[in-house]
Image (cartoon, rainbow, N blue to C red):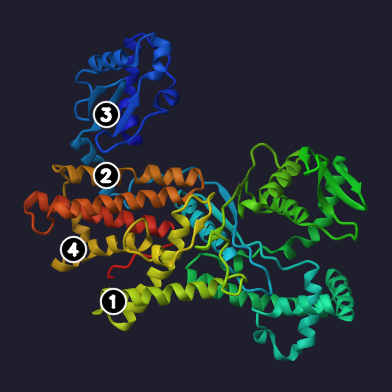
Amino acid sequence: MRNLVEAIRPLLGSVMSQLGVAELDWNDLLAGSTDSAFADVAMPCHSLSRVMRKSPNVIADEILETLGSSTDGVCEVSSVNGFLNFSADSRWLAGLLQDALSDDRLRVSTEESRVIVIDYSSPNVAKHMHVGHLRSTVIGDALNRMLTHKGHRVVPENHIGDWGTPFGMLIEHLIDMGVEKGSQDIDLSTFYSDARAKFDSDSEFASRSRARVVRMQASEPETIELWQMLVDRSLIHFNEVYQRMGVLLTDDDIAGESKYESALPGVVDKLTETGMLEESDGAKVVYLEGWKNRDGDPLPLIIQKADGGYNYATTDLACILDRIENVGSRDFLYVVGAEQAQHFSMVFDVARNADFMDEEVNSIHVSFGLVMGTDGKKLASRTGGAVHLNDLLLEAVERADAIVAQKNPSLSDEERSEVANMLGIGAIKYADLSTDRTNNYTFEWEKMLSFDGNTAPYLQYAHARICSIFSKDGIDRNSIREANIYLNHEREMALGRALIAFPEAFDSACSSHSPHKLATQLHTIAQAFASFYEVCPVLGSEGETRGSRLALCDLTARTLQTGLDLLGIASPQRM
């Protein structure tokens, strides 16, 4: 527990000086410290053996004796097998909880504000969003919320695929369909595949498509108008999905490939000036030291193809320049699948070698694993194709509706629909966010919609359960903030420890761009509350005990609601 470590650090510093250890590497000393049900901090003394030339057991006993009563009111200390166990004093812990109770931010601090660009979601125009966009959208949205809460100005950029050679065939297919029908008649589930099939089988159509690309790159008004029709139709679909998911992205956040098209020749010119560009089979490439292909030959990063077209790398380099020069950011997060790790590493290397980015720029690939099916393969539809994300969301709400109807038939149709939406969408998001993003995870309906285990329904139910405590007696929750907190029962202490760890878990989640650390702490809090509520009567208690336990309930509910909101998940008051 960071709070306790910070509280005991000056005391330990004084003790170590008395024992002849002038300089202490706190990171080294605390590296092996652990939390447990019996001690808030279990600190090993093994690393001090080489300095003090004594066994860890002797060192721990000497530190304990020298500390004496100096930790009274903060913690109790014991020495066991070379470890110093620091157990938080109930009054000290209650004081921290009291601070959190009266604080709208629950003791979460802010940082010096930075402008942080988060590149996430990134679907392709003229295609349905599919399950492959789920993790980028959900993780990116959570980081957007979390970093904003820490005081930063987050600039979300939805780098949609809205330019390039495929648009020649897409525009020609649109013309063949009959433009007069309007973009609303475009069926995104088949539009792209139909255009591709025609391109592969009809040479005349393929020739027209290639010619259309040239006209598009020349900004021919008629062609750009048709291109815009495809973009507009796609944005309707994207926004429908985003609204159903409850994510923050809007049209104002669109920063597609087309935005950077005019800047690409300038990227080539800048790289030419540095002397980094070389020719390879007619293409302009950069060879980076240390990058090899499978055969051991130098691996090029293609900047401009032999036919004059540009690659993703060129666009990403243009993005970097724009974000530094126009957005004014020095912090970029790319929420993109782990399979793109090599691409981003090479792009970042080129950007630094070309002085597009200096050492003050933090450019980070926030990678993530795959969504897997129960068969152990990448999640796919029954036909083997990509699962449409909108269909997945609709099914989640439908499944949740059936569960809510069974659990609480007294809810009105309107209430049940609202709760089912919160439950279904929350279940999908939480299943993703509660997993270490670098790992794959298995998509299982039964598990993610369960009211047991580390799931959104479990946390949402814990929140609703607390809300019902206050609604039963019509208690004004604002008045509860004036109550004094006492921790007289071990279950109250356990809940207090879990609540006090919330700011630390949140900070760790932000600094490592790992929402699962926040999710894990929320689950710990919900578990601790369940144990507390099982044996500690709330409404059935009296006097100061009743007020204190109501305060713990309120603080727990607010912490769960705040944490879930930072993950982009709603907290129903009734379920």
Residue extending farthest to the right is 282
What's under tag 3, amino acid-wise? Phe
Q: Is residue 82 left or right of residue 358?
A: left
Q: Decide: is 363 above or below 235.
A: above
The local crowd at label 4, few if under 14, some if 14 to 19, many if 20 or more residues have their Cα within 10 Å, is: some
Gap in Å between the C-alphas at discs 3 and 2? Answer: 22 Å
Q: Which residue is mark 3?
A: 86
Q: Secondary structure at mark 1?
A: helix
Q: Residues within 10 Å of mark 3 (few under 14, many from 20)?
A: many
Give the label, 1 or 4, closer to the camera.
1
Q: Earlier in the sequence, mark 1 or mark 4?
A: 1
Query: Can I make out residue 290 in this image?
Result: yes
Which corner quadrant holds the N terminus?
top left
Q: Earlier in the sequence, mark 3 or mark 2?
A: 3
Q: Give the labeled residue for mark 4.
A: 469
Q: Which residue is mark 2?
A: 99
Quote the CA–CA distance across marks 4 and 2: 23 Å
Q: Is residue 347 above or below residue 195?
A: above
Percent of width and height locating residue 105? 35, 50
Q: Identify the mark nearer the N-term, 3 or 1.
A: 3
